Image (cartoon, rainbow, N blue to C red):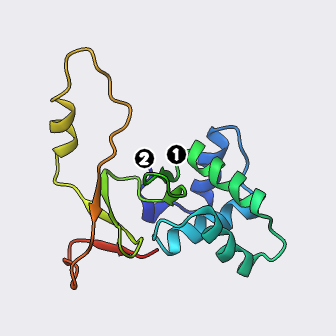
Amino acid sequence: MIPLAQVTSDALSQRLGESGLRSTPQREIVYDILIKRRDHPTADEVFARVKAELPTISLATVYNCLEALVQCNLIRQVNFDRGPTRYCPNLHPHAHFHDEVTGSTYDIDLPPGIVEQLKAQLPEGYAVSDVEIMFRGKTRERRPATVEHTAR
């Protein structure tokens, strides 16, 4: 996995190429938008941000770009119940906290080894392909310093 800070245009092109896709200006802008503000935006929110930089882009193109980035494991989809899909560029093991009052989503760092401890609780014969940990509730007046705020 390429660390988030090191995903350059060349690395993006390489990851897309490994999946049989090519880098396009639209994919690069969509990815850049997600990296700049890691606030778990919806496709509509990504579209509005990209449109400011690339006025001719369509919503369908944004959806296609997001799908390509997910397929190449450059971003992850995050879903909260019946809400719209959100997109997260943080590929390191982490949890999400969804503020049910404001709709904001926060990345929560996990203690080292916690995912392996959770996997060890499964019965023999189970193979884990992904672990998603989500917390729901409301944030306090002042957020803890260890929580990266990613407002809606």
Task: Give coordinates of residue 23: x percent, y percent.
Answer: 71, 54
Furthest toward the top, the residue is 125
Three-letter residue code for mark 1: Asn
Three-letter residue code for mark 2: Met
Q: Quadrant of residue 65?
A: bottom right
Label 2 sits on a secondary structure element that is loop
Assess disc 2: are there few (<14), some (14-19) or many (≥20) residues with their C-alpha within 10 Å of its C-alpha.
few
Tell me: 60 left or right of 107.
right
Tell me: 117 left or right of 150.
left
Residue closer to the observer: 16 or 89: 89
Task: Give coordinates of residue 41: x percent, y percent.
Answer: 53, 67
Q: Mark 2 or mark 1, which has the lower sequence index?
A: 2
Residue indicated by mark 1? 73
Residue closer to the observer: 117 or 32: 117
Label 1 sits on a secondary structure element that is loop
Up-down relation of residue 109 to residue 37 (above or below):
above
Q: In the rendered structure, find residue 1 and report the number of the disc placed on it.
A: 2
